[in-house]
Image (spheres, rainbow, N blue to C red):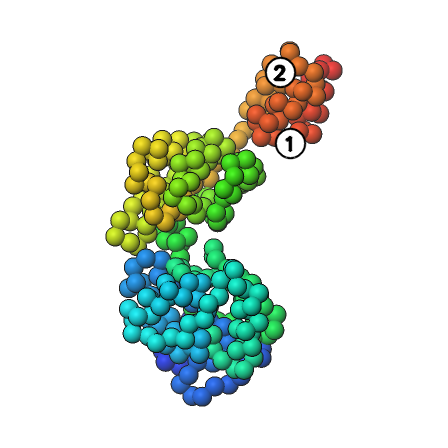
Amino acid sequence: MSSSDEPKQGSAPRPDPKHGAGTSKPRAKGTLQSGLYVTGVPIGNAKDITLRALEVLRGADAIAAEDTRVTARLLSMHAIAGKLVSYREGNAARAIPALLARLGRGEAVALVTDAGTPHVSDPGGPLVAAAAAEGHRIFAIPGPSALTAALSISGLTAQRTLFAGFLPAAASARRAELTALKPLDAALVFFEAPHRIAETLADLAAVLGDRPAVICRELTKLHEEARRGTLAALAEAALGDPNLQRGEIVIVVAPGKAENPADAEAALDAALGKALATMRVKDAADAVAGALNLPRRTVYARALELKGG
């Protein structure tokens, strides 16, 4: 998009003829057009808010906030008297119809999360989907995101990046999800709670292998830190350093090295040979499949071939 396609500061966004005007209604000159404004807010430093986001927050008829107390502090910093409406996972069933009704009356509704950009790791998605289903205009008001901020300072290069959000809290479920992610040729980005960081790093190292990684903590805040190392080294550091168990945390993990197929086959045969010396085919296949994170059917078929030979 060229700079001439961007709406002028202080003017309403122009309808996009490719996407249609939806059910949005025209508004008085100089005010926001009716629609849902998905608005990025700072992840820490309040000065990171954009001029366009401030314009939207000042002009919106309602601001749907994940935590109205958090958003009220942000609005106060910028001398904005916004009309706050609570919209969170716990009240979505009631809040979404009410917000859709506002849009139906031709109002401009700003959607914000506590920090960052809505719909990245918060309950914004259902409201956006419901508004789109009813044909309302939806405007992106881009802003800060912990995901892109962490990637930008990680120093880890990859052709692809996968954002995996928060891993499961239960250890078995977490390891199962990591096993599914392991073969992907992509950098992996996770959000994590500070009280789980040590055990999560240990599982990352055990399942993914000892890859290079970066822990980004308290991004844009006073105690911002980027700790670099291998997953195993970072897991050990997290156990001994209480500072790594504090604040908002993003983990960026480098892609794994592609395995040589011949090496992988040799490792499978070696493991099966050892297991078959003391186990039945079925038991050996179960044990090796679990140890190498391989499909049991594949391992069982190879075990039968080796046993038959």
* Residue at far bottom of view: 28
The amino acid pointed to by label 1 is Pro
The crowd level at tag 1 (other Cα within 10 Å; few <14, some 14-19, many 20+) is few
Identify which amino acid the numbered label 2 is placed on.
Answer: Ala
Q: Quadrant of residue 6?
A: bottom left
* Label 1 SS: loop
From the viewer's perspective, is 286 left or right of 252?
Answer: right
Kindly identify which numbered label has been placed on residue 78: none
- Residue at far right of view: 308
- Circle 2 residues within 10 Å: few <14, some 14–19, many ≥20: some
Task: Check the image and report above or below for 283 versus 6.
Answer: above
Q: x, y (%) of residue 147?
A: 41, 52
Q: Which residue is mark 2?
A: 275
Is 253 left, or right, of 279 in this rendering?
left
Camera-side residue of 200 and 29: 200
Based on the displayed image, in which of its 4 quarters is residue 235 positioned?
top left
Q: Position of residue 180 (x, y in %)?
A: 57, 39
Q: Is residue 102 visible?
A: yes
- What's the mark number on residue 295? 1
